[in-house]
Image: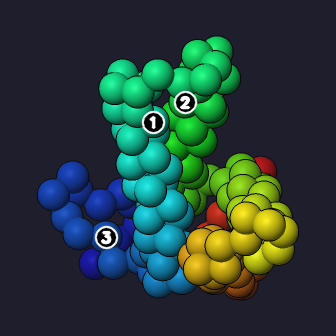
Amino acid sequence: MSEPLNSKPNPGEQVSDQSSRRPILLIALSVVIAAEAALATGVTVWLVVELLTATPDSFASAVVILLLAAGLACALWAMVVGLLRTQSWVRGAALTWQLLQIAVAIGCFQGVFAVPSLGWALLAPAVVAILLLLSPPVVAATRRLS
């Protein structure tokens, strides 16, 4: 006798449905954004140490920069969790962050205080993340089905 079409698997039973698997490109995008989040977290920790050990020219400015870095780190970690849960809001947030990162990277290539190596370090993952964000498997996995 065959199983009914609307039967649910037992709690201990493995589900082999292909739709429940995350595409490899989504996992790759999660890794790229997790690396950015880890670096943002590291910068936040470094800013806390600097604030506690050095005397800033402007304490208020130092605190605001610290809060911005902490907020960025939290937002990036939230994007990683959202990607792993295949939530649709992540695409817009991640694309916005990558475009801002590209703008900063372009600034690193020009001007009196140009640091091209930092520009490439910012530009490369941003371009990779955008390509992954726009790939059909990632878009399909994070599409909102109402």
Q: Secondary structure at mark 1?
A: helix
Q: Residue at x 64, y 19 (%)?
A: 58
* Residue for badge 2: 66
Q: Secondary structure at mark 3?
A: loop
Q: Which mark is residue 15?
A: 3
Type of the residue with mark 1 = Leu
Name the residue nearer the viewer: 24 or 108.
Answer: 108
Type of the residue with mark 3 = Val
Left or right position of 26 against 139: left
Q: Residue at x 39, y 41 (%)?
A: 46
Provide residue 64's location: percent of width, then percent of height. 64, 24
| Label 1 Cα crowd, 10 Å radius (few <14 / some 14-19 / many 20+) | some
The Cα–Cα distance between marks 1 and 3, rounded to whole angstroms, is 45 Å
Name the residue nearer the viewer: 82 or 38.
Answer: 38
| Label 2 Cα crowd, 10 Å radius (few <14 / some 14-19 / many 20+) | many
The Cα–Cα distance between marks 2 and 1, rounded to whole angstroms, is 6 Å
Q: Residue at x 31, y 70 (%)?
A: 15
* Residue for badge 1: 47
Residue 90, placed above or below residue 5: above
Quadrant in the picture for the N terminus: bottom left
Provide residue 99's location: percent of width, then percent of height. 80, 64
